[in-house]
Every structure is written in C-alpha cells, then in structure tokens.
Amino acid sequence: IIIGVCLVLLLLFWKDLLLIFFDETQAITVGLSPLFYKILFFTLLSACVVAALQTVGAILVIAMVITPGATAYLLTDKFKTLSIIAIILGAVTSFVGAYISYYLDGATGGVIVTLQTLLFLAAFLFSPKYGLLTRNKKAVENV
C-alpha cells in the first residue's frame, strides 16, 4: 500500500518536485510552495524507509536507497534516464534477490544488497564514461 501511494504521488507531482529540488527560486516564481513539496517528498521517503526497516533492517535499507542511484549515476548524466535506471535496478534486484534468498534459505535483504553491490562494482569498473577501466585506458592512450 505504501509503495502504491508513494508511486502515485510521485507521478502526480514529478515536475513540481524536479523544479523545487533543482531551482527553488524558479519554483517560487511560478507560485509553488517549496516547503509543501519538500515535506511531501521526505514524508514519502520516510514511509518507504520505515516499511523497509521492518523487512531488511537499518543498514541494508540505507544501502537499498543509495546503491541503485549511485549505480545509475555511473551509467548516465541525464536525470530522467538516471531515474529510470535506478528504479529498474532497485526493482529487479529486489525481485531477483527475494527469489534467490528463498531458494538459498538466506536473508532477503542481504541477498538484495549483495546483488546491488555487484552491479555497482560492475558499473564502477566498466562504465563507458566513469568506469575505472575506461579511465585507465584513456590515461594510457594520452601518454
């Protein structure tokens, strides 16, 4: 239920939230209330975190919130694409991690975060623009 409410509200207020978080002065100029939208956003985030705390625990929730976005950031510079990649990574790793943990009889949160960490490491190494191997290859070519 919490995810559904959060998803609907984020879709309804997506453009307003983008404007407020990226250019608050412009948002005020067009008549938006930054305080209202910030309270809305952080309330939704808090609701999702509290729901996840009961499932996977405090440390793993932090990893599950940060890792998909960090991985997506390594893969693209466009915010819309970054958001889509982060959502897909979070959803896919959650479903696959839950499935794997069921068959391995392991902790669901730990498996999910392990999958997300492996994807982050792969992006960190092989990302076309920010990847460690890409940067090393460019450095060798410049010498």
Image (cartoon, rainbow, N blue to C red):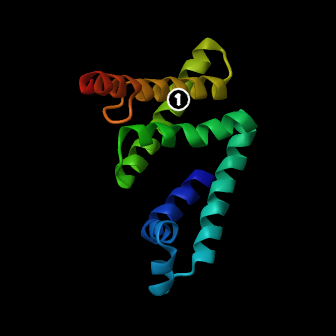
Residue identifier under label 1: 116
Q: Residue 74: x percent and y percent?
A: 41, 38
Screen quadrant of the C terminus: top left
In the picture shown, does residue 141 fall above or below 14? above
Residue at image location 45% in from the left, 43% down from the top: 86
Q: How many marks?
A: 1
In the picture shown, does residue 50 fall above or below 143? below
Q: Residue 103: x percent and y percent?
A: 58, 14
Q: Residue 39: x percent and y percent?
A: 65, 69
Residue at image location 34% in from the left, 51% down from the top: 78
In the picture shown, does residue 67 fall above or below 104? below
Who is closer to the viewer here, 143 or 99? 143
Q: Amino acid at mark 1?
A: Gln
Residue at image location 63% in from the left, 55% down from the top: 45
Tell whether 28 sits left or right of 110.
left
Q: Residues within 10 Å of mark 1 (few under 14, many from 20)?
A: many
Q: SS for tag 1?
A: helix
Q: Tell which residue pokes out farthest to the front in this image.
A: 143
Who is closer to the viewer here, 13 or 127? 127
In the picture shown, does residue 36 fall above or below 4? below
Residue 86 in view in this figure: yes
Who is closer to the viewer here, 137 or 48? 137
Q: Tell which residue pokes out farthest to the left in this image.
A: 141
Residue 88 in view in this figure: no
Q: Residue 67: x percent and y percent?
A: 55, 37
